[in-house]
Image: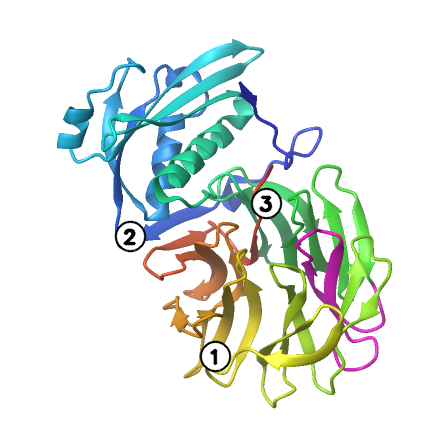
């Protein structure tokens, strides 16, 4: 039995957030080839505080990769009429049970059955405390996604973002579906540029609480904060190395903003870019050997790449006169960025092997892209009706989601890593 541990819950309970801050998700579009999946109501799931099967359905549907077939309740976990389900158009059937396990916990058992192969594809048994029922459901959805697409699911990951209402700024963390919101930091001064550590236990960000931009790293379990960069001038744009040992930042301590790298505790600060222009928004490559960054050294902002040790930089973006905010997919093959064309700021991706470019958004004020850890979706900030909201789009542009809150603006998103 797999007992659930969740590293995002801060000791003592957790940091409740008002209902106004809860994210609302709207979905449009579907994938090009949807997989039909029947999802049964889990036996006795009404005994638990969480409707496991509904969360699984919502996750799979939100991905755009599946067509959901309501299967009702299947009480016999050992006998599946494959032919009957195949005739209803289902390629696979999800079944499960929820059983009290004492101390308020529940045993959540699930099986994924293939009507094409007439056999079991997968099963997962978890023991979940009541507050982790949603996580148990997300993990099942992850398993279904991976077994049927061959790509790791990201439903059990987390996102971080900043909400603003008047002069109140809040750095919040939530499930990938917008539920389970928790507060990491509240301030009367702006909070920008949050960035997850690779192990998902910390977030680096820029806070203006000292009346100037300072880079912090905050442990989400202990709430302990460490100052990473508080140099003369601006301290901005923190980004983690893939192994979590380094943080790249943009500092203006010597005049023009340049790229620096420090150890994760703020020690060992060293300069890695050296230009007469502005170099900012660093991002480590997937293998940690290079840094992508934005620079105006060619006359307008474009994205460049240089060795993590500095040296000559190579220009990467050539489509359009203004490209900023580089982000690299986990496999290192795709660059996401914001491009200004015809006066619109929109989300683009560039295949670094074929050099093929694709515009993913149809909005006009996009900011702060962030890849899902499986590389299949991008989270970004945008604007609609003079209010800032978040959006998610699949890397082929077909599936779109909008995430909004009841009051105020939501911006500066970052998608967290897979959790071990």
Q: Which residue bears the numbered disc 1? A: 340
Q: CA distance from mark 1 to mark 2?
A: 27 Å
Quadrant for residue 181, please give it: top right
Left or right for 276, reference 325: right
Q: Which contiguous range is marked in magenta?
A: 230-259
**234 or 97, which lies in front?**
97
Left or right for 283, reference 73: right
Q: Is residue 329 above or below residue 95?
A: below
Q: Residues within 10 Å of mark 2 (few under 14, many from 20)?
A: some
Quadrant (top left/top right/bottom left/bottom right) for the C terminus = top right
Q: Residues within 10 Å of mark 3 (few under 14, many from 20)?
A: many
Q: Is residue 187 in view?
A: no
* Residue at x 69% of width, y 41% of height: 220
Secondary structure, mark 3, is: strand
Quadrant for residue 342, please give it: bottom left
Q: How many marks?
A: 3
Quadrant for residue 290, please give it: bottom right
Q: Is residue 55 in view?
A: yes
Secondary structure, mark 1, is: strand
Q: Are marks 2 and 3 in contact (CB under 8 Å)?
A: no
Q: Are marks 1 and 2 in contact (CB under 8 Å)?
A: no
Q: Earlier in the sequence, mark 1 or mark 2?
A: 2
Residue 243 sits inside the magenta stretch: yes
Q: Which residue bears the numbered disc 3? A: 173
**395 or 54, which lies in front?**
395
**399 or 333, which lies in front?**
333
Q: Are marks 1 and 3 in contact (CB under 8 Å)?
A: no
């Amino acid at each position: 039995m797999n007992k659930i541990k969740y590293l995002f819950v801060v000791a003592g309970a957790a940091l409740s957030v008002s209902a106004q801050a809860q994210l609302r998700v709207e979905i449009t579009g579907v994938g090009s080839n949807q997989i039909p999946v029947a999802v049964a109501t889990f036996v006795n799931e009404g005994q638990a505080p969480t409707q496991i099967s509904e969360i699984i359905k919502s996750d799979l549907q939100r991905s755009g990769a599946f067509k959901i077939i309501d299967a009702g309740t299947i009480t016999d976990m050992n006998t599946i009429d494959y032919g009957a389900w195949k005739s209803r158009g289902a390629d696979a059937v999800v079944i499960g049970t929820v059983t009290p396990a004492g101390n308020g916990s529940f045993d959540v058992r699930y099986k994924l059955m293939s009507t094409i192969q007439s056999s079991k594809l997968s099963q997962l048994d978890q023991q979940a405390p009541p507050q982790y029922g949603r996580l148990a459901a997300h993990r099942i959805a992850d398993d279904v996604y991976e077994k049927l697409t061959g790509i790791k699911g990201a439903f059990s990951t987390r996102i971080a973002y900043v909400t603003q209402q008047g002069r109140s700024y809040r750095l919040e963390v939530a499930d990938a579906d917008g539920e389970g919101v928790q507060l990491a930091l509240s301030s009367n001064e702006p909070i920008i540029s949050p960035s997850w550590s690779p192990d998902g236990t910390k977030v680096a960000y820029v806070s203006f609480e000292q009346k100037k931009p300072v880079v912090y790293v905050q442990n989400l379990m202990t709430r302990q904060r460490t100052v990473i960069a508080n140099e003369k001038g601006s301290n901005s744009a923190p980004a983690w190395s893939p192994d979590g040992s380094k943080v790249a930042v943009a500092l203006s301590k010597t005049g023009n903003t340049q790229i620096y790298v420090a150890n994760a505790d703020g020690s060992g600060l060293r300069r890695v870019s050296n230009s007469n222009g502005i170099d900012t928004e660093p991002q480590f490559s997937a293998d940690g050997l290079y840094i992508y960054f934005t620079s105006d050294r060619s006359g307008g902002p474009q994205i460049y790449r240089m060795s993590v040790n500095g040296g000559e930089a190579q220009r990467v973006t050539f489509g359009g006169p203004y490209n900023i905010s580089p982000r690299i997919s986990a496999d290192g093959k795709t660059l996401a960025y914001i491009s200004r064309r015809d006066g619109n700021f929109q989300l683009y991706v560039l295949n670094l092997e074929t050099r093929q470019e694709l515009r993913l958004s149809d909005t006009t004020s996009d900011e702060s892209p962030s890849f899902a850890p499986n590389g299949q979706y991008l989270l970004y900030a945008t604007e609609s009706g003079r209010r800032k909201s978040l959006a998610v789009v699949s890397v082929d542009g077909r599936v779109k989601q909008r995430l909004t809150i009841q009051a105020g603006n939501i911006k500066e998103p970052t998608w967290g890593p897979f959790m071990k």
